[in-house]
Image: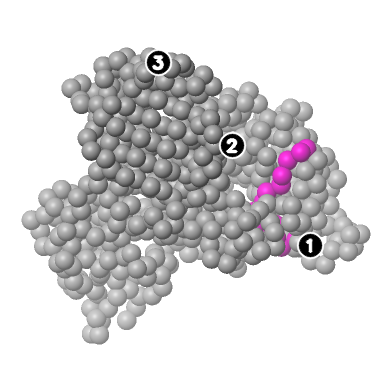
Amino acid sequence: MHKFVIFICCILTYSTTYSQQMGLGNANFNSVDSSSKFIAKAPEFAIIPEPVSLVQADGHFTLPEQIIIQAPADSKNIVDYLKTRLTVPTGKYISESSGNTPGSIKLILNTHENRQLGDEGYQLSVTPQHIVIKANKNAGLFYGVQTLLQLFPKEIESKEEVADKKWTVPAVEITDYPRVAWRGLMFDVARHFFTKAEVKQYIDGMVRYKFNILHLHLTDDEGWRIEIKGLPKLTEVGAWNVKKTGNFGSFSPAGPDEPRTNGGFYTQDDIRELISYAKERFVEIMPEIDVPGHSLAIIASYPELSCTPGAENYRVRSGERIMDWSRGAPPIALVDNTLCPANEKVYSFLDTVITQVAALFPFPYIHMGGDEAPINFWQKSDAVKALMQKEGLKDMHQVQGYFEKRVQQIVESKGKKFMGWDEVLNGNIPPSAAIMSWRNASYGIGASRNKHEVVMSPQDFVYLDLMQGDPIVEPKVYSSVLLSKTYQFDPVPAGADPKYILGGQGNLWTEQVYNMRHAEYMTWPRGLAVAESVWSPKAKKNWSNFIAKTEQHFKRMDIGETKYATSVFEPVFKSNRTPDGQLMVELQTEIDGLDLFYSFDNSYPDHFYPRYTEKLVVPKDAVQLRVISYKGKQPVGRMITISTDELNKRAGKK
């Protein structure tokens, strides 16, 4: 479920609306001037997400040479996690006790419930003598551990022992609990396959910031990623395509002799292992089987599930163009990637799939997709026309609605709850269906008012595959979501019925994400903004404070060897023309405290070069502009080169 295909028609259409497309109308954006010398002091407490309450006390706790962790016997997975996180960088010996032995670090489950904390809240007390975390449930203890680790020096993230380091934690009293229950990230393993180890790595990154749901997008046109017993072709055929390099969506069609060796899938034992790994870290995994659209991998495996003659010649997509988005949604399909709603074999197939998926995944919801289903092949199908006449269906929305209701019945017959993308609302689906709102917040608001459970994931705030800086340096996708925009995400938007809002999540689609390092680059730091939006009280959110904390977390990620994007430090280029037709460029930034230095003479600027203070008239014969960002005397971000041809394109003709 991803809108990358719009890239074909509009990715580099720079016009007078460019600044709106990039979010430059956002109040967080700054036109850099001479007042940008201010350098923010690093905060002593750089906790993400921001706690509900934090009170600093006097002194520091210093880790002793021999650390004792005192914890309940049924908190062993938390103790093991904490021991690993502490032992590796500190090299200290750690023992554990489930009795009343005095401990350096105490994890305590409340004997009397603290209703303020709920199931996931905690209280963290650090004094010069000890560290104590209290919670009602083990989940709260685990999240208290995440906060504790963020209080240690950044070297705590090291994957090897750090010599001669004093391991201290500032004395503090913290009370904390989440704003919403559903705090998710979606990881698309269908467009590009990620190994079991890489999924675990993604989970490890999530839990540092108190995410608790991993939405696994397991099926799409590019691959089917889960073993289904009795349907072997789904993984023998549907899990493999041709390896391509370049811009997804515009690859050349795969030839018959090109090897279909790119891809992979998870066995059911792999799935069980991932579920167990996640559960130990208080993460639930929600599976998604995306139907009736986005189903080319299914059709290539079992062409009899299509309405369209010739489907036996279809192959799993390798990134070639299969949709025409030039007339908007729904797209015009160039090949029929939909299951046939008029074919009873489809519902038998889905019953088999859903039965096994329901048995594998303990999570109460199964996401069944429902987005972006093209209708042009259905419109030509005699079987669909007959179905419409038989069932009294008036249009293609009702045809898909018929399909969705039958799928919902199958899901619910397995003791699970049905969830779909917000397009399923078009078919008058019953309120028992949960909705994931992606097109914009209005769909989720409306669904909540109609008593649907809703997860908010609007693309204009939390689509993590979109560009996060100027397109001249970012991997090209059809649109942009800058960090400042993601930070404005509100999982409980005005007008929604909060009783039906489960929470929110960020979505990482992977058409253009080929490896784990790039998945990290696209997730962080925007994932930090999502985390703070779904955990922290709305009143506690503060953009300037968040940026100062994020810079500290970049240092932690450097030590932990996690990749992240520095786009927030870099300018976005806006160009127009003077009244007499000269090309003029304006540099805008998301954050304060940056100095931008530039050159037009093809050399590489540093902080001895001219500093940007106001709009620049581009010299007549210049061929490019180079810009680099500094904080004080330290460069931040990347050296960016933009051609005057590109600036002219953005300015439009005079």
Q: Position of residue 250 (x, y in %)?
A: 51, 52
Q: Nearest the camera: 507 or 115?
A: 115
Tell me if residue 423 is in the magenta stretch: yes
Q: Earlier in the sequence, mark 3 or mark 1?
A: 3
What residue sits 86% from the left and 61% below the top? 388
Instruction: Identify the disc placed on residue 398.
Output: 1
> Which residue was labeled with disc 3?
101
Q: CA distance from mark 3 to mark 1?
A: 66 Å
Quadrant assignment, res 348:
top right
Q: CA distance from mark 1 to mark 2?
A: 31 Å
Dot 1 falls on a residue whose secondary structure is: helix
Question: 10 Å neighbourhood of mark 1: few (<14), some, or many (≥20)?
Answer: some
Q: Earlier in the sequence, mark 2 or mark 3?
A: 3
- Label 3 amino acid? Thr
The magenta segment is: 414-427
Q: Nearest the camera: 612 or 457?
A: 457
Extreme residue toward the right, this view = 390
- Label 2 amino acid? Ile
Dot 2 falls on a residue whose secondary structure is: strand
Q: Nearest the camera: 439 or 587?
A: 439
Q: Is residue 273 left or right of residue 148?
A: right
Residue 615 visible in this rendered orientation of the protein: yes
Question: 10 Å neighbourhood of mark 3: few (<14), some, or many (≥20)?
Answer: few
Question: 10 Å neighbourhood of mark 2: few (<14), some, or many (≥20)?
Answer: many
Q: CA distance from mark 2 to mark 3?
A: 37 Å
Residue 295 visible in this rendered orientation of the protein: no
Instruction: Identify the disc placed on residue 285.
Output: 2
Mark 3 and mark 1 residues within 8 Å of each other at the beta carbon: no
What residue sits 62% from the left and 26% below the top? 272
